[in-house]
Image: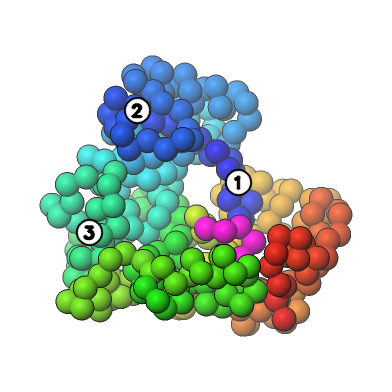
């Protein structure tokens, strides 16, 4: 369970442990039957959660019943695509949101991947995504399916930049803008590299990442709601996510809106957060510059107001060993 960077709801990971006990992680719940899964969903809705997250190791037969229950109770369903399904089937089963752009690409690689609970969900994308024709009928039909169902995609392109384009001994590109601000032990981790590549597939993995960015823009242009998640260090990596969204061709002001008002609207929280207005929660950032024109100015935060309490950004960073933005 956790809260995303941009006013996202807390989420629940529901698992099926006999289906994939060796693929589990030490978070979430484990359900042997659909009735157990539904009981877990009810429990968390009763506790006030507003979104249910499903993971790759969930029995795919559980998705439709979970989605039906969640919709009946006014709660969204999001997550990874369970092994044995592709993204289009996840959407048709009733999921409201797909997380991670790699699962979008895997929709077109079903005959290339044996088990998406393994690192294949990354390496297969590196091996084949660059070869997907984004103007093809299967891709256009899939995007139309997303539109027809009102599906949201939390792309998290920053989570894959280092994975697909980072190389051992070189600074990971997602960390480069903030490297000299970080503690030494964190700086060292920026040189580890991403997925293992060879001279034969080095450029292919870079091209596959560029295809993921182009797919993100294609979905955006088609009106698919895009969200700005990170799956990375809170407080420093959301900035990179927004920069990469702008790199795809999105206007900077729209990237800011994706991370604020659009997320709040999606979760029906925009009456309280997501924009500045009388009576809304006093969550504000004071930034030196204009990120609506130059998105990287979002890194130059000077003051943060949370629930009406004012904090000095530089002091907060220093408290965790990070040098503030210049």
Q: Is residue 98 left or right of residue 243?
A: left
For the point 55% across and 70% down, the residue is 187
Q: Considering the numbered disc 1 on the image, is that residue within a helix, a strand or a loop?
A: loop
Please tell me the numbered disc located at residue 87: none
Task: Let me know if residue 244 is in the magenta part.
Answer: no
Horizontal side of 44 relative to 314 (left or right) equals: left
Looking at the rendering, in which quadrant would you find the C terminus? bottom right
Query: In the image, what residue occupies the spot 20% across and 65% down?
Result: 128
- Image spot of residue 257 (x, y percent): 61, 65
Q: Is residue 325 above or below residue 216?
A: below
Can you give x and y, in whole percent of width and height, for residue 122 in the image? 29, 57
Query: How busy is the neighbourhood of tag 2: few (under 14 within 10 Å), some, or many (20 plus)?
Result: many
Q: How many marks?
A: 3
As drawn, the label of residue 3 is 1
Q: Check the image and report above or below for 47 versus 241.
A: above
Left or right of 27 in this view: 87 = left
Give yes or no for contact between labels 3 and 1 (Cβ–Cβ under 8 Å): no
Q: Position of residue 196 (x, y in %)?
A: 28, 66
Distance in Å between CA atoms under marks 3 and 1: 29 Å
Query: Which residue in the protein does label 3 denote?
Result: 124
Res. 214 in view: no
Circles 2 and 3 in contact, beta carbons < 8 Å? no
Q: In the rendered structure, which disc, 3 or 1, sits on the residue that comes first in sequence?
A: 1
**Which of the pair 39/137 is nearer the observer?**
39
Q: Which residue is mark 2?
A: 16
Res. 238 visible in picture: yes
Between 190 and 124, which is closer to the camera in this rendering? 190
Q: Which residues are magenta?
A: 232-237
Neighbour tally class for label 1: few under 14, some 14-19, many 20 plus, Cα within 10 Å: few
Alpha-carbon span between mark 2 and mark 3: 24 Å
Query: Seen from this angle, which residue lies furthest right?
Result: 309
């Amino acid at each position: 369970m956790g809260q995303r960077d941009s006013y996202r709801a807390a989420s629940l990971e529901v698992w099926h442990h006999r289906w994939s006990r060796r693929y589990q992680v030490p978070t979430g719940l484990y359900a042997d039957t659909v009735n157990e899964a539904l009981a877990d969903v009810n429990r968390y809705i009763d506790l006030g959660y507003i979104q249910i997250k499903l993971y790759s190791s969930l029995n795919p037969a559980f998705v439709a019943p979970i989605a039906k229950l969640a919709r009946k109770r006014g709660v969204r369903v999001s997550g990874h695509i369970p092994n044995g399904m592709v993204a289009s089937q996840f959407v048709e089963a009733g999921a409201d949101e797909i997380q991670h752009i790699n699962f979008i690409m895997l929709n077109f690689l079903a005959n290339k991947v044996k088990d998406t609970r393994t690192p294949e969900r990354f390496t297969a994308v590196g091996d084949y995504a660059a070869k997907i024709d984004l103007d093809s009928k299967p891709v256009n039909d899939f995007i139309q399916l997303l539109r027809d169902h009102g599906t949201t995609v939390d792309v998290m392109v920053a989570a894959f930049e280092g994975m697909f384009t980072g190389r051992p001994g070189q600074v990971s590109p997602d960390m480069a803008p903030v490297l000299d601000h970080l503690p030494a032990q964190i700086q060292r981790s920026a040189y580890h590299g991403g997925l293992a590549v060879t001279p034969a597939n080095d450029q292919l993995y870079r091209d596959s990442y560029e295809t993921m960015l182009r797919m993100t823009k294609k979905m955006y242009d088609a009106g698919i709601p895009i969200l700005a998640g990170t799956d990375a260090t809170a407080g420093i990596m959301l900035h990179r996510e927004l920069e990469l969204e702008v790199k795809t061709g999105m206007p900077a002001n729209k990237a800011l809106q994706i991370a604020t008002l659009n997320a709040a609207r999606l979760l029906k929280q925009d009456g309280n957060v997501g924009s500045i207005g009388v009576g809304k929660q006093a969550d504000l950032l004071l930034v030196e510059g204009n990120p609506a024109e130059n998105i990287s100015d979002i890194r130059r935060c000077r003051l943060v107001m949370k629930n009406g309490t004012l904090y000095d950004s530089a002091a907060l960073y220093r408290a965790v060993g990070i040098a503030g933005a210049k």
